[in-house]
Image: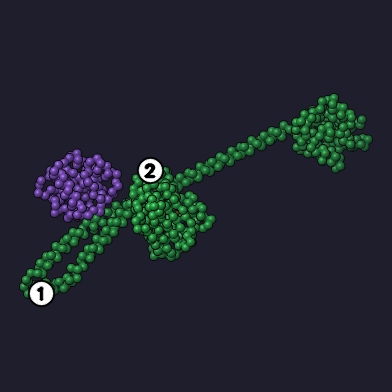
Chain colours: A purple, B green
Amino acid sequence: MPERPCVLVVDDEPLNRDLLRRTLKRDVEVIEAEDANQALEMLAARADVALVLSDQLMPGPSGTELARTVRARHPGTPVVLMTGYDQDPEVAKSMTDGFVIAIVSKPWQAPALRQLIARLLARAALA
Amino acid sequence: MSAVLDQIRQVLEGSVDAAVVLDSDRRILYYNRAYEASTGLRGRQLAQRVAAGDRCYDVFPLEICKTACLGCKARDVGRALRLDEIKAVRGDGEELTFIVAAVPVKLDGGDLVIIETYRDVTADVRIQRRLKVLLERERRAKENLEEVVRERTNELRQAQAQLVHQEKMSSLGRLVAGIAHELNNPINFVYGNVDFLGQYMEDLLRLVALVDGAPLPGELRAQFEQAKADVEYDFLIDDWRKLLRSIRAGAERTASIVQDLKTFSRAGGELQEADIVAGIETTLNLIAPLLKNRIEVRRRIAPSVPRILCHAGHVNQVFMNILTNAAQAIVGEGWIEVTIENVEDARAVQITITDSGPGIKPDAMAKITDPFFTTKDVGEGTGLGLWISENIVRAHGGTLVWGNAPVGGAQFVVVLPVRALDATEPVVERAGA
Ligand SMILES: Nc1ncnc2c1ncn2[C@@H]1O[C@H](COP(=O)(O)OP(=O)(O)OP(=O)(O)O)[C@@H](O)[C@H]1O
Ligand SMILES: [Mg+2]
């Protein structure tokens, strides 16, 4: 298990990325992408990304679409979705289809998010 | 025999109408062949009776003979008379109908005779009657058809109006959901960042305290104390926590409103356990512009109201409609009282909404849940609110009753069973179809 696992944050909203960085930077190394395509490029360039934390609604491919591609290209990298629509059927489906391992509904609280990410990383490291 | 009479006989002999010539005593002086047929007497029989001097009203009795002999009248007034649709019963019992005409004629000798003719219109009358029946039947069928068309049109109109209303409510739902979603990110910035701000503040103040506690050279100490005074340091170290608390409280409240809005806008679809009290609060928030500074909302809410298994979005529509009506009914200042209690051994929740408006008009009382019934101006009300509300409540196995309260105006009582929908189909979908 590497010293500080790397988490890729994907969100088109810079203020959200700042907040996520602030929230997670003590536990992990945070790298950022502003859309799904950029995220895929970064994943291709870095093999050590331990987890992807993505917004659902973004210009271009959505979070669930990103998750599907990640599953295909980097099956070992889990994806967590952040969404404001806790009833979005697409989100629910991506969860049951297994592309997404957790859903964070907005607005989220920093301590809960940190715990969740830590737990998921620990699980991923064991796997 | 008079020459005139002889001429008359010649004219009448071949006539298709039955005809007789009567003397002033109503004895039969002459009858034609058609008369024979009308009386139903056989030739010999008739001849004998005529020879014996039988009167016309005995030989061939018409319904008018006894009471209003037409021949007598014609004689009295001295001109021809005619009556339509006179009944007579023939010797064989068959009822016939005739047009009867009577003409008084003066013979050369000065004697007065009456010529009566009887046209058998029995068949015509029968046909006419049949025609009338047929026409009547046709008219009724047409009326029925019109009735059916009216009914169908009404049904269509209702279905269409319901669709329009549903569309209205679901676009309201979409709008609310959209707004709620748009608010999520900004709330998250505030909500998420405020803790870091607090953490940073703590860190900075720790640094300051460290400096403060260090033995500073005199000049630096003076400078430091001056700076502390300038920024009102003593006040600041107290106030920053309060500040942060109120930012957090603001963000939390906004977040909970957004959460409510999300619940509120959740349309039909799946059943869920909904918090009625929260639903009503959200509704009151949504119609706040209608209430503002004008209407006081009084709440009397039981301490523990159970959650209700329902289609929350639909149930919220019910309260939306009733509360909007109440607010619209109140002119100027007033109050709305919302009472929520557990009834039927906590197996149902009863929501009573009373307003201080003028009440429901007596002649409207029975009609307010009829589709399209409204007393409001065109454009202000479609008259569908309560109709849809009643449908929704029924679909949830509940009841909606209304009346005027002893104190105040209108009162609406909604009773919703806590778990009625467990066993049943989601009928709401059908009520809305
Ligand atoms: N609180 C009330 N006080 C007095 N009358 C009422 C009250 N609520 C309803 N009514 C009467 O019932 C009628 C029907 O109400 P309903 O909500 O079905 O339709 P509406 O309010 O007229 O129109 P819509 O709700 O479609 O905008 C109203 O027009 C009004 O006459
Ligand atoms: Mg109404």
Q: Give x and y (percent) for residue B200.
A: 16, 61
Q: Residues within 10 Å of mark 1 (few under 14, many from 20)?
A: few
Is label 1 on the same chain as label 2? yes
Q: Secondary structure at mark 2?
A: loop
Q: Please name the residue that numbered disc 2 is placed on.
A: B423
> Which quarter of the figure is the C terminus of chain B placed in?
top left
Task: Tell me which corner region of the image, top left, top right, bottom left or bottom right, holds residue B54.
Answer: top right
Kind of residue at badge 2: Ala
Q: Give x and y (percent) for residue B322.
A: 43, 55
Q: Secondary structure at mark 1?
A: helix
Q: Is residue A120 left or right of residue B332?
A: left
Q: Residues within 10 Å of mark 2 (few under 14, many from 20)?
A: few
> Which quarter of the figure is the N terminus of chain B placed in?
top right
Residue at horizontal 25 percent and vertical 63 percent from the top: B246
Residue at horizontal 51 percent and vertical 55 percent from the top: B365
Can residue B299 be seen by looking at this rendering?
Answer: yes
Nearer to us in this view, B400 or A32: B400
Kind of residue at badge 1: Ala
Pinpoint the chain carrying mark 2: B
Q: Give x and y (percent) for residue B218.
A: 7, 74
Pinpoint the chain carrying mark 1: B
For the residues labelled 1 and 2, the Cα–Cα distance comes to 79 Å
Nearer to us in this view, B48 or B110: B48
Q: Please name the residue that numbered disc 1 is placed on.
A: B222
